[in-house]
Image: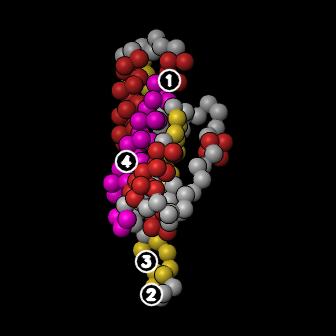
Amino acid sequence: MGWRVTGNDFSEADLREALDEVVDETASEAALDAGGNAPVLSGALSRSFYKSSAKGSDYQKAVAAMRAQNPGIEVEPETPREDWSEDDIHNGLVDSTAPHAPLIEEGHFNVRANRFIAGRPSLGNALRGQSDKMMSRAARALRKLGAKNVSKA
């Protein structure tokens, strides 16, 4: 999906900066939403979500918050930027520092109970929920730069 923009008297550098801000804000909101949607046993999972974007990463903050809830928990390493970022593409990452996050998100087979435990997709739901908001943020950023008419192409 693209945008139809008229009256664009802004520089490419200004546009890149504005889009980086949109991605960073959206990733931050998605991480907060994922934490709010996560099931709570010890509270470690709900505090384990972090964002990473061109503006920076909240990984260390998420590790500290998760360990405050469960000091002995293992920590997943931060996903390296080169694994998810490409040149000239404005993108961000939302992930979890908790090793059990994929099991909760996608579901798993519990051997002791001899049954499948259904997934509770807090991260997936958070990302889907931010999709339209990201488009609104992008349109608002274009208007703030001085675009006269911004519409979906």
Name above or below for residue 89 compared with residue 72: above
The three-letter amino acid code for the residue at tag 2 is Ala
Q: Which residue is mark 3?
A: 117
- Is mark 1 in CB contact (under 8 Å) with mark 3? no
- Is mark 4 in CB contact (under 8 Å) with mark 3? no
Q: In the drawing, what numbered circle is on residue 113?
A: 2
Q: Crowdedness of circle 4 by 10 Å Cα count: few (<14), some, many (20+)?
A: many
Q: Which residue is mark 1?
A: 17
As measured in the structure, the alpha-carbon distance from the residue carrying label 1 to the one carrying label 2 is 51 Å
- Is mark 2 in CB contact (under 8 Å) with mark 3? yes
Q: Earlier in the sequence, mark 1 or mark 3?
A: 1
As measured in the structure, the alpha-carbon distance from the residue carrying label 2 to the one carrying label 3 is 9 Å
Q: Of the residues tagged 2 and 3, which is closer to the observer?
A: 2
Tell me how the rendering is colored.
secondary structure
As measured in the structure, the alpha-carbon distance from the residue carrying label 1 to the one carrying label 3 is 43 Å
Please name the residue shown 41% across and 55% down the image: 68
Q: Which residue is mark 4?
A: 32
